[in-house]
Image: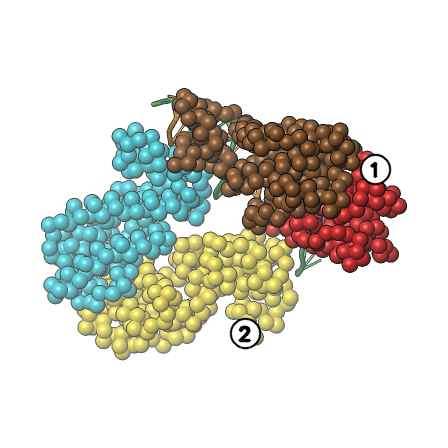
Chain colours: A yellow, B cyan, C brown, D red, E orange, F green
Amino acid sequence: VELGHFRDLARGGGKRARTRAALLDAAILVVAEKGMEALKISDITSAAEMANGTFYNHFNDKDEVLREAAYGIAFEISRQLDDDMKDIVDAPTRVVTATNSFIEIILHKPEWASLMLASGTYLPQLRADVSQFLRADLERGVAQEKFEVDVSDFLLQQIISLVTVAITTQLEIGRNKALNIEVCEYIMRLLGFSPAKARKIVAATI
Amino acid sequence: VELGHFRDLARGGGKRARTRAALLDAAILVVAEKGMEALKISDITSAAEMANGTFYNHFNDKDEVLREAAYGIAFEISRQLDDDMKDIVDAPTRVVTATNSFIEIILHKPEWASLMLASGTYLPQLRADVSQFLRADLERGVAQEKFEVDVSDFLLQQIISLVTVAITTQLEIGRNKALNIEVCEYIMRLLGFSPAKARKIVAATI
Amino acid sequence: VELGHFRDLARGGGKRARTRAALLDAAILVVAEKGMEALKISDITSAAEMANGTFYNHFNDKDEVLREAAYGIAFEISRQLDDDMKDIVDAPTRVVTATNSFIEIILHKPEWASLMLASGTYLPQLRADVSQFLRADLERGVAQEKFEVDVSDFLLQQIISLVTVAITTQLEIGRNKALNIEVCEYIMRLLGFSPAKARKIVAATI
Amino acid sequence: VELGHFRDLARGGGKRARTRAALLDAAILVVAEKGMEALKISDITSAAEMANGTFYNHFNDKDEVLREAAYGIAFEISRQLDDDMKDIVDAPTRVVTATNSFIEIILHKPEWASLMLASGTYLPQLRADVSQFLRADLERGVAQEKFEVDVSDFLLQQIISLVTVAITTQLEIGRNKALNIEVCEYIMRLLGFSPAKARKIVAATI
DNA sequence: GATGAATGAGTATTCATTCAT
DNA sequence: AATGAATGAATACTCATTCAT
């Protein structure tokens, strides 16, 4: 059988770690199915095929398990993004690659999507952490005199919101590569490139 | 005392209409304070200084009162926007004006903001209705050969998300005219204008 | 239009009497549709096309309107039964006639049935009042040396229960003359007649 | 202390089974005290000395607990009746024995009576199940050329209603053996026996 | 007298949390 | 550590009753 991400990490660990991992995986699945609001502890434990009381041996409350799951996922996504981007120096190429890879990673694990998107609202710290990577690339682009913007939190939020829309749209209507290209072009335009230049950069990258 | 929007409309109406209006106003306030998820019927009735049973004389459930409140607000916003825009023919000017006015209207009634923003998720029909105005202006801009985009639902969602971020940011950090200018410039860039042209259009408009 | 029984009686009376009568008629209808347990005051007033507050101008509570309606119906049934029986002296003939007529009257006004049947449980006084007519005929039959029974409350209840079953069965499966004959024969048997004699008496009467 | 019927059955079972049994016993008691209509979940749980939420760990709603209690009681009554009747072949003797034993069993457990009697109305299936035993004995009696009747649902209802009256009367005025004899004689009369023969059969049996 | 809006006590139901086993 | 039964606070919703118009 296919294990969830956390159970996979916990393979070979102790029983406690494996139980905990199973709860984290279950929490992710349940959020994907029912959303964060409708989430019940008993949904998590029954998805993990455990007694409901077991939950409290590992977490104090709903928020705790969700926070931990969200950070775990975010960490894994960062790891994969780092992999994809470690040799790229050109800032526009980095931003386009990051955008496209991020969307692709999430759409390959759609059960992660709900939690990630909701965390934007529920876990401001997570959003801030994630933003730092983007901020670095934007500042790099400004330094390279490629981007014509002031790098600010507001700008970061704007770009993140464009990416978020690209993800939610594809979760609704199904995967669609063209939308990835489209959103990358819009981001490039937003960063100061002309439509033609934006198209060229994106086409050269993904 | 200052009345809420609905009580204001209901002035001179019958007792039933006034009570109903008070509940709509109260629902808006409570959503602004606690969010839509945490909303309890008893919050609404106690904010309206009524017995909880009174709620059910006027609405069947939470959704009904929220839907009605959201549509009422949307209608009022549309009315004001129409006012601001009735004589503008240039598409970019229309888009910039609409964006700026919309943000200003919401920020003048911050208690409307939560409901409006949440309605994007909860009332897809409302979002679709509102989108039509924007779509018309985008298509006008394409016809005028000012905008270099394909008008699609995806594009509409992208632009709406930029505006949404501008609102939520100002709700958090306080009103800031510069952000209105910034988001309008980004939208102009996204629609195909160069940074310089975008700046000029926005500066000429707001 | 056809009026209910009480409005019919109240024709020509004052407005107050007519409103009251309309409520009594409405109560009967609603009991017939929903049963006594599910009965709501607002059901009665809306069936009577009145405001719910009007109810309390005429009755103190549910029980009062139901009691009054039940007695009114019982009185009307008695009147009709008296009519059918005033010239009959033979006790077995009286009992068979009463049984058959009672069932027929109720089945002609099926909206009366629910209230009458329920009143057996809810209004012991009504049941006792009605029983007196039957008791008189039974005692007459004993005096005539036709019935071989001790007349007791228990016996009355037994006979009434047989009649009740005949009514409820026909309310469920539809009217069926044969069941009237059958129940009359069973009552005659119960009162001491042989099956053959019972059949003859019933056949001669209805 | 004396346990209720279900707790008695559940002795030695697990905690879950015992709690469930306690709720079933409590439901029976509460129905006996207040009737089925007035029954509240909180009545049941407080009679069982539990928190109200516990009810929902075991039953979905009122109907479910009542249905289960009614079937449990009916099963126990059947068991006892079977015991009393297993060696009796003569149909009239069987009917008289069954009638008398049924009444006696119920009057020994008066808290069962309300539920059983109400179940006639609320659980048509239960009534139908119970009727089958009576039907078998009536058909046996017809085959033995002892009973002069057509066996029909209507006849079954009639006899059941006579028994029901015998029970309710004794619940009201106290136990009274003579009424058992009386109702058995009436049933025998109804099945075609003369008063004298009916008396003899009943006297020989109980 | 009639109206019907407002009231609020009463009840069912859910679910996070505890804790004995 | 895991279990899962029990708990009870929280909340939605109903409807008899009141009372100002």
Q: Badge 2 local density, few (<14 within 10 Å), some, or many (20+)?
A: few
- Total marks in image: 2
Which chain does the residue under circle 1 lie in? Answer: D
Q: CA distance from mark 1 to mark 2?
A: 73 Å
Q: Residue C106's x, y, as percent?
A: 56, 38
Left or right: residue A177 compared with residue C124: left
Q: What is the number of the mark on residue A2? A: 2
Q: Are marks 1 and 2 on the same chain?
A: no
Q: Chain of mark 2?
A: A
Judging depth in this view, the residue of C60 and A142 nearest the camera is C60
Furthest-bottom residue in this view? A204
Q: Residue at x 30, y 70 (%)?
A: A179
In the displayed structure image, the side of residue B168 where residue A44 appears, left or right: right
* Circle 1: residue type: Lys
Instruction: Specify the quadrant that holds the N terminus of chain A.
Output: bottom right
Secondary structure of the residue carrying numbered label 2: loop
Front residue of B67/A63: it is: B67
Q: Pointer 1: residues within 10 angstroms few (<14), some, or many (20+)?
A: few
Residue visible at 34% across and 33% down in the picture? B16
User: In the picture shown, does residue A119 fall above or below C153?
Assistant: below
* Label of residue D177 in the image: 1
- Image quadrant holding the C terminus of chain A, namely bottom left
> Residue A67: x and y, percent?
49, 57
- Front tag of 1 and 2: 1
Q: Is residue B153 visible?
A: yes
Q: Quadrant of residue A79?
A: bottom left
Q: Amino acid at mark 2?
A: Glu
Image position, residue D86 (x, y; %): 84, 56
Q: Residue at (68%, 33%) from the top-left corner?
A: C90
Q: Secondary structure at mark 1?
A: helix
Q: Is residue D167 visible?
A: no
